Image (spheres, rainbow, N blue to C red):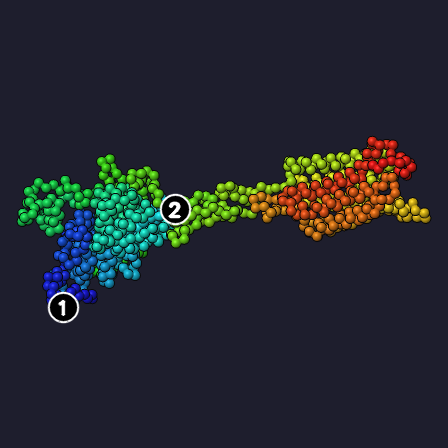
Amino acid sequence: MLWITWLSPAVCKGNADTCKLWNEPQLPVLKSNGDFVVGGIFAIHAYMKSEQNTYIRLPLQPPCSGSMDFRELSYARAMEFSILEINNRTDLLPGITLGYQIYDSCAAVPMTVKVAFQFANGMDEYFNYTNVCSKSTVAAVPALVGESNSTPSISMARILGLIGIPQVSHFATCACLSDKRQYPTFFRTVPSDHHQAAALAKMVKKFGWTWIGAVRSDSDYGNNGMSSFLKAAQEEGICVEYSEAYYRTQPHSKVERVANVIRSSTARVIVAFMASGDLQPLLEELVRNPLPPLQWIGSETWIINTQLLRFKMCAGAIGFGIPTSVIPGLREFLLDLSPAQALKSTLLKEFWESSFSCSLTGTSESMRECDGSEDIRALQNPYTDTSQLRINNMVYKATYAIAHAIHGVICNDTQCDKSIQFAPWQILDQLKKVNFTTKNGYHVTFDSNGDPVAVYELINWQVKNDGALDFMTVGHYDSSKPKGQEFSINKAISWVGGQTEVPMSVCSDSCPPGTRKAVQKGRPVCCYNCIPCAEGEISNRTDSLNCIQCPPEFWPNAKQIICLPKPVEFLSWDDTLSIILTVFSVAGAFISLFVAAVFYRHRTSPIVRANNSELSFLLLFSLALCFLCSLTFIGQPSEWSCMLRHTAFGITLVLCISCVLGKTIVVLMAFRATLPGSNVMKWFGPPQQRLSVLFFTLIQVIICLFWLTMSPPFPFKNLKQYKERIIMECGLGSAMGFWAVLGYIGLLAFLCFVLAFLARKLPDNFNEAKFITFSMLIFCAVWVTFIPAYVSSPGKFTVAVEIFAILASSFGLIICIFAPKCLIIMFRPEQNTKKHLMGKIPSKSV
């Protein structure tokens, strides 16, 4: 039982006319009897414009006194046509006649609520304001079609849901109506705005618009639809500069304020989630003071409204609309209307008289009397326009869905039983199961939320040859397709101002590759600065949020778009510096061999024999090895070359120093041997000299073996010294091993230098000690300066410094020790005599 008080007696005392108005039942505008009566409600009389140019509802004026909406009339008659077609079928409800009771909601929520109670309680001619359920406990209709708008549909759904009467709307798109906990009996054949909002956001993203404005109807339809859109837009990375709401009943100053916000904005794209009646006053206000061209994005309610095509500023508008359709026989049904038939219905009489500006009864003083010359087929208005049947098809499908639900309750495979008593919830259960295809080829089914599969056409307002605007279908959206394939465009789009290129609407220009976005403080994320990527980072796409760090062995190119392999640097054979060092190395080796050849040829000469020819040949051999071992430092380091270069140069240098040390000791011992009673020379003869060289060299060999065993040198890529290139070098492995090798060489060189320095003034005509002193002085100077140069030299120059130290010290030894002897042997043979060496012939010092 449902209780309602329309207006209390206290209120009615001073408002008798108002009480009479609201306590009297609303009468159907179109009706027909049948075995089962299907309800219908449409906003046939929608809006009235006041003297203040404000669009208002008229809840307390005489019902439906506003102007007639011919589109809504065509929807109501589409339901009438559908029921007549169903009654003529033998496969659907055979032997059963459906009737209809179609009401006018007057676009007013109070009127919608009143009709909802009549559907719930029966069509009594008088309603008791204290208990409208006193005479009827059975629902008057098994189901109903309507309403057209979301807010009235919400009011009806709350009431009808309590009783269980199914409501199938043809145009109420608010996503809130999908909530089955609040609206358990609500169904619709039009898609939910949840899908439209997602489709609009994807479209905006597809065309690259990231900075948009938004306006909406301040109603359930506009607020819920825009809320869904803003959420989807945020997920797509779209920013909204402003979001304004307006409703047609609000003061005109509110329209002016919204228009001024649009004029002062920088966004060139505006998404309007508005009912047609709310958008019209806003467009009229914008026309008064033209603004720069805007790209309009429309919701399905106004993007397919032919009455708004007169606003040229909306040329290029694009949005999703209900798909067009063809309903065979509907046009003939709508046009099959004569003056005699129109007189049978108050609604059709009003339509006829307002369309032809004449009176059918001849009682009007302001209009002429209709004379029979009126031709309905010559009319050009939304009622007669059946070129794009969109919402009409939704009504057609809704009516058929109810018929199939009734069929499922009272019919079996062969016949139907009109005497069966059923409750509304049985129709509700059957509606959840409907799955059929209409005569014009459209599949009808509902999901768990009472919604159909979302299918839209992408509508574009294009300028025709005559300059008028018209709709053009340029694409489709089908939510049943796989993700990412729902949206398709198959025709060229005409943008604002007739442009063929997509207009731009961004807060900041796109950041090119090589830069990243940096959000401007206090502004939306779509407003940003483009910051170049940091050193070593890249961004390889437009509008990168972050830069990517290149891998360790890669480095960005000049534009910081891609990571390129870092050039590997080492002392290669084709390097100019390598060629120079190679020439000196080979030249040093040849000089050593040449000196050895000269010494061998003059091996019996006094100067060769007097300077320990055996140690001299061993020294020349080791010097040749020193020159050649420097070549192991050139080329790309490998495991074997790294171990060879350090150990070879360490052993060969020790061999050289050992020979020089032996020669120095021989000089000292030879002087001691000339003293009376000295027998020291027998302790340092040739065998002892060989053993000393072997002993000193063996120590270095042992150090190198320990080094190679514990932690040998190895090739590695030095990524730290330079950011933009790789230094291929030999790691020391054990630093202690490396410095032990150098330290041992330095120890021997220092010992040799001290001994040679002590023997430099011994009284001989050709004292070799002073030449050894010079050579050791050069050797020590080279290797002392080598250490800081080695540590501070960059890249391949580290290796070049080491090679230079080897070559410099080797050349110092061969020049200081052997150059004077070769000069005497080759150019001053007169000094190469025993007498000269013994001091018997005075001569100048060489």
Q: Earlier in the sequence, mark 2 or mark 1?
A: 1
Name which quarter of the figure residue 629 lies in. top right
Q: Nearer the viewer, mark 2 or mark 1?
A: 2
Q: Residue at x 39, y 46 (%)?
A: 508
**Would you say 831 lies left or right of 115 here?**
right
Numbered label attached to residue 844: none
In the rendered view, does 420 fall on the left or right side of 126? Answer: right
Q: Which residue is painted at 27% across and 54% down in the image?
A: 245
Instruction: Give, as a three-letter code, the residue at label 1.
Output: Ala
Local SS, label 2: loop
Give whichever of 721, 275 is nearer the camera. 721
**Which residue corresponds to mark 2?**
508
- State the residue in front, 719 or 161: 719
What residue sits 77% from the left and 35% below the top? Answer: 591
- Quarter of the picture containing the C terminus is top right
Between 25 and 285, the one nearer to me in the picture: 285
The image quadrant that residue 371 belongs to is: top left
Taking the image as shown, residue 449 lies to the left or right of residue 795, namely left
Rendered-image quadrant of the N terminus: bottom left
Asked if the residue under mark 1 is in contact with the one under mark 2, i.e. CB atoms within 8 Å, the reply is no
Image location of residue 843, percent across then percent down: 87, 35
Place of residue 200 in the rendered image (x, y in percent of width and height, measured from the top left): 32, 48
Query: Badge 1: few (under 14), some or many (20 or more) residues near its Cα, within 10 Å?
Result: few
**Crowding near pointer 2: few (<14 within 10 Å), some, many (20+)?**
some
Residue ID at (67%, 45%): 789
User: Does residue 134 show up?
Assistant: no
- At mark 1, the secondary structure is helix
Choose between 611 and 193: the one closer to the eye: 611
Is residue 816 visible in this depiction of the protein? yes
User: Mark 2 is on which residue type?
Assistant: Ser
Estimate the spatial distance between the alpha carbons at disc 2 and disc 1, rounded to whole Å. Answer: 63 Å
The residue tagged 1 is 10
